[in-house]
Amino acid sequence: MKTLLSLILLFLFCACETPERKSPQSENMKGKFAIAIHGGAGNLVKMKLTPEEEESYKQALDAALNKGSSILANGGTSVEAVEAAITSLEDCPLFNAGKGAVFTHDGHNDLDAAIMNGENLECGAVAGVRRIKNPISLARKVMEKSEFILLQSEGAEEFAKEQGIEWIDTSYFFTQHRWEQLQEAIEDDKTELDHSEKKKASVDKPREEKFGTVGCVALDVHGNIAAGTSTGGLTNKRYGRIGDSPLIGSGTYADNATCAVSCTGKGEDFIRLNVAHDIASMMRYAELDIQSACDSVVMKKLKDIKGRGGCIAIDQQGNIAMPFTTTGMFRGSVGINGEKKIALYEDK
Ligand code: ASP
């Protein structure tokens, strides 16, 4: 009798303690989906983008949101939507991912990407690939077709070939403005963020900065969330430097039980704090809602170490948070009510 009672108590304890990862959509969430994307954060106020340039960024964000949303509207999965939205941003030379990625010190474009499925905690990532047009698609292949999680450089490219992903010529990634950024960074002997003013930086006149990494988080009509991130990293990076984006838990994380997160900013700060996973942990253990969890990690802990950047996050109810410590973050979202928002700076 005593044993039976212990077993029942143990069962009840486990049932309470184990968060329901694959929880079915509640009645009021049936058929609902939501999506958020980012195209990097930074201290943007003084960037003086022309109205035409601002419009181009907004249009690119809008196109990526539309790609992801239409997949979700047709019953596609959050993983499919994340891949499609990020592919769209990777193909756009305005962002620091895929075409338009920044250059390393040696004049290469070393690309990193990660994707994670909140339904089952499956994830895949690649780092330092040079011949793959859409690194996010390769990351998805790693997640779905390999027994590993993070593949790097030539090994990752070899795996791509085996999976039927064609290599492309490295010249595809060249853009003049990124090349000029590298020359300026080399001149200053600095590891640079992906946007900078032409003038030399000084203490009084620090360089403008924008981290142009791209990312997406989504909730599908099946109740599952996913996250993905893709980047060229930092201009003038060397020694095979890898940032937070392809590191599960630092720049990218998804778990149905809590949230899906994609980060952008100085990767080293995000790795130190394990930002994406810490947000999920604040939801799980401190039982914070998504906005409070994001604020406690990004607006408090990240700020405390003078970390620069932000994140986008979504939960299973379609709540979206997009905090950033910089003066801007290129971002967009479609909420569960269908409302679309696109913004570049703090207020618009
Ligand atoms: N987080 C990226 C990295 O450090 C950079 C970015 O967000 O633009 O590689």
Image (tube, grey):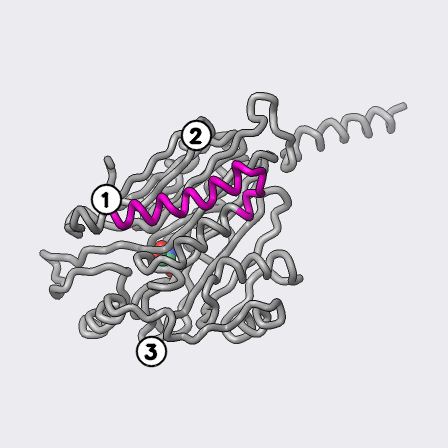
Q: Residue 13: percent from the left, percent from the top? A: 71, 29
Q: Residue at x 17, y 52 (%)?
A: 47
Q: Quadrant of residue 240?
A: bottom left
Does residue 248 appear to the left or right of 26 in the view shown? left
Mark 3 C-beta closer than 8 Å to ligand 1 = no
User: Which quadrant of the picture is home to ligand 1?
Assistant: bottom left
Determine if the magenta segment contains residue 135: no
Is the residue marked by circle 1 packed among few (<14), some (14-19), or many (20+) residues within 10 Å?
some
Query: Hey, what amino acid is under mark 1?
Result: Thr
Determine if the magenta segment contains residue 79: yes
Viewport quadrant of the C terminus = top left
Give how far apart the Cα atoms at labels 2 and 1 are: 27 Å
Camera sees residue 100: yes
Q: Residue at x 39, y 38 (%)?
A: 333
Label 3 element class: loop
Q: Is residue 321 above or below residue 129?
A: above
Label 1 element class: loop
Residue under circle 3? 106
Specify which label sits upstream in the sequence, 2 or 1. 1
Q: Is residue 262 above or below residue 140?
A: above
Specify which label sits upstream in the sequence, 2 or 3. 3
Residue under circle 1? 327
Q: Quadrant of residue 337?
A: top left
Q: Which residues are magenta?
A: 55-80
Is the residue marked by circle 2 packed among few (<14), some (14-19), or many (20+) residues within 10 Å?
few
Does residue 343 appear to the left or right of 279 in the view shown? left
Q: Residue 6: percent from the left, percent from the top? A: 81, 28
Q: Quick one: which residue is furthest to the top in this view?
A: 28
Residue under circle 2? 338
Q: Nearer the viewer, residue 125 or 292?
A: 125
Does residue 279 appear to the left or right of 99 in the view shown? right
Mark 2 C-beta closer than 8 Å to ligand 1 = no
